[in-house]
Image (cartoon, helix red, strand yellow):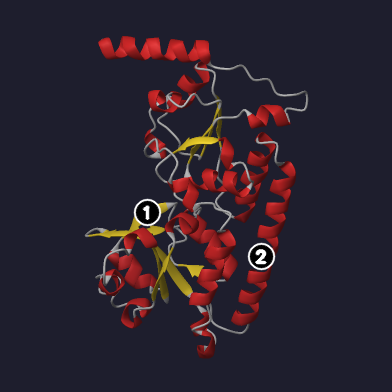
Amino acid sequence: MYKYLSFILFLTSALLQAPVHADNAAGIPSKETTQKMRIIASGGSITEVIYALGKAQNIVATDSTSMFPKAAAALPKLGYFRQLSTEGVLRFQPTHLLGAQATGPDTLAGQLAAAGVEVHIFDEQRDLHGLQHMISEIGRLLNAKDEARTLNTHIGQQVTELKSEAQARAQNQQPISALFVMSDSDRGLTVAGGNTVPQALFDDAGLVNVARNLPDYKVMDNESILAANPDIIFVASHRAKEPNALARLCQHPALKATNAGRNCVISTMESSSALGLSPRYPDALKRIIQQTATFYAPELAHAK
C-alpha cells in the first residue's frame, strides 16, 4: 500500500512539473521546441537513428540495448526496453519517449502520457522500406526532415549498389541457402524466420533463408535443419563471444551433417545491425555478400 501511494504521489508531482508542448499547425515541432526536447530513446534502432540525424544532444537516457554508436553506451541506462519502469523514465523529466515496437510493459505508454510525456512507439516493417519509413517519422518529430531525407537517400543508394553487385555475382549460379542463428539449446536452434531483418538481408543478398516459413524468431528443430541443409550459417555476435564458439557450433547436432557444418562455413554478424533496423543496414548487407563471395569465385573469398 505504501509503495502504491508513493507511486501516486510521484506521478502527481510529475504531472504538475511536466512542461506543456504544442505542435504547430502542420503538426511539426518548431526549432525552438525541438531544442527543448528531452528524449528517452527505447531500442537500439531508435537511438541509432537519432544519432544519425544529428539530434543526440536531446537524448537524456536510453534502454540497455542502445550501445551504438560508442557515445550512446555512455548514456544513462533504464534497463531492457521491454521492461521499463515508469518511475525510472520519469526520473529524467523527459518530454518525449521514442520507442521500438516492443517497448513496454503494456502499462508504460498510458502512465507516461498521463504524466505529460509524448510517447511515440514505432511499428516495424523489418526491411529497408521499414527502416526508411522509421527514419522519416523520427526526422519529422525531431524537426530533421532534410537530414532524414539525406540519410534515406544515402542508405538507398548503398543498398542498390550492393544488390547489383550480388546479382551480378550470382548470375547463372545455383542459389545459396543460409540460416541465421540467434542462440542454441538442446531443443534446437533459435533462428531468424520470415518477417525479420535477417530475412530482408538474405533477400537483398540473393540468398535463400531455409527458415523463411517460420514466423519471426523461432526454435527450429534438429531434423528440420538437417533437412534444409544450409550452405552457410550466420551467427549473432553476442552468441559467439567465447573462444572456439563457432567451431563448437559447427559440431551442433543440428548442423554438423549439413553443408555448412561439414565445412564449418559460419560467420558472425554484429547483433544490433543484423537483428534490428539500423542505419547500418548497408554494412550488414555488405558483410553477407562478402562472406558468400567464395561460393561464386574463390579468388574473391578474402575480399573485405
Q: Note whether 90 is above or below 288 in the view shown.
A: above
As helix, strand or loop, the secondary structure at mark 1 comes to strand
Residue 70: give x, y in percent of width and height: 47, 52
Q: For the N terminus, which image quadrant?
A: top left
In percent of the image, x 52 and y 26: which residue is there? 94
Left or right: 297 as drawn, with respect to 193: right
Q: Residue furthest left?
A: 186
Left or right: 46 as drawn, with respect to 106: right
Reading the image, the residue beneath label 1 is 218
* Amino acid type indicated by mark 1: Lys
Between tags 2 and 1, which lies in front? Answer: 2
Residue 193: give x, y in percent of width and height: 44, 57
Query: Is disc 2 in contact with disc 1, using a CB cutoff of under 8 Å?
Result: no
* Label 1 packing within 10 angstroms: few (<14), some (14-19), many (20+): some
| Residue 6 position by quadrant | top left
Residue 158's disc number:
2
* Amino acid type indicated by mark 2: Gln
Left or right: 280 as drawn, with respect to 225: right
Say how many tags the image has.
Answer: 2
| Residue 243 position by quadrant | bottom left
Out of 243 and 157, give the one closest to the viewer: 243
Out of 297 and 49, give the one closest to the viewer: 49
In percent of the image, x 73 and y 27: which residue is there? 27
Q: Note whether 20 is above or below 259 in the view shown.
A: above
| Residue 191 position by quadrant | bottom left
Residue 22: give x, y in percent of width and height: 68, 20
Q: Note whether 262 is above or below 104 in the view shown.
A: below
Residue 152: give x, y in percent of width and height: 68, 53
Q: Residue furthest right?
A: 25
